[in-house]
Amino acid sequence: MSLPHAILTALLEKPSSGLDLTRRFDKSIGYFWSATHQQIYRELGKLEAEGFIRALPTEQPARGQRKSYEVLPAGRAELQRWTAAAQDPKPHRDALLLRLRAAAVVGTAGLETDLRRHLDLHRRQLAEYEEIEKRDFPPGNDSAQARLQHLVLRAGIELETFWIQWLTEALEELPEPAEQAS
């Protein structure tokens, strides 16, 4: 149920069209809550039908013109309700961790290459997050909104840092082929 809340959040930050939301998801919210173009448009329709958002009026309605949406008071109230509600953490499911566990009983053939690939992907993601941090959170931007947004980004930075350290350790712990044969 979080996609509608992600959309409400994005629209409260800035009224947008579906296309603009898709682009913004690709650059920010999508790092921790992804959605396709189709999912976003489907949710916009549902949110509008529920009275949580409305299409902004245009001066000259034209066929094919993008509709921009804004959050209505009921949508803000729903987002406040959802934000305040207790939620249990979700169990972490990761195929790479399961594959490493399986490798303990069937051998690690092919695993090193994929661990190195994952390490490279996490290094690139960390570099991207650090660039966003440098660009979007300069010293002195101390508003409550900026601090909370920065906190979310810091979580991404810390997660990528963890994965880089863990993958480096995993690569060091992989047994040599001769060691596996015994």
Image (spheres, rainbow, N blue to C red):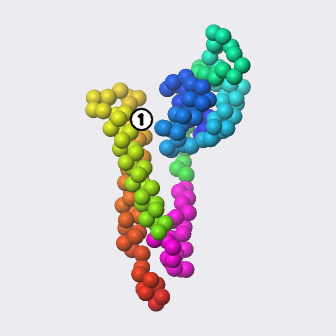
Q: Quadrant of residue 173?
A: bottom left
- Say whether residue 71 is visible: no
Magenta-highlighted stretch: main secondary structure? helix
Q: Position of residue 142 (x, y in %)?
A: 32, 29
* Residue 75 against residue 3 in the figure, above or below: above
**Three-letter amino acid code at disc 1?**
Gln
Q: Residue at x 60, y 30 (%)?
A: 19
Q: Residue at x 55, y 52 (%)?
A: 90
Q: Position of residue 121 (x, y in %)?
A: 45, 55
Q: Residue at x 40, y 34 (%)?
A: 148
Q: Which quarter of the image is occupied by the N terminus?
A: top right
* Residue 163 against residue 43 in the figure, above or below: below
In this view of the protein, which residue sits in the foreground, 134 or 9? 134
Q: Residue at x 39, y 54 (%)?
A: 123
How many marks on residues? 1
In this view of the protein, which residue sits in the foreground, 11 or 129? 129
Indicate yes or no whether the magenta region holds residue 151: no
Q: Residue furthest top?
A: 59
Q: Residue furthest left?
A: 139
In this view of the protein, which residue sits in the foreground, 166 or 5? 166
Disc 1 residue crowd, few under 14, some 14–19, many 20+, Cα 10 Å: some
Q: Position of residue 169 (x, y in %)?
A: 37, 67
Describe the element under mark 1 as helix, strand or loop. helix
Judge from the rendering whether residue 72 lies leftward or rightward of residue 167; answer left or right: right
Q: Position of residue 96 (x, y in %)?
A: 52, 64
Q: Which residues are magenta?
A: 91-112
Indicate yes or no whether the magenta region holds residue 103: yes
* Residue 149 against residue 12 in the figure, above or below: below
Residue underneath mark 1: 149
- Say whether residue 93 is visible: yes
Judge from the rendering whether residue 171 lies leftward or rightward of residue 39; answer left or right: left
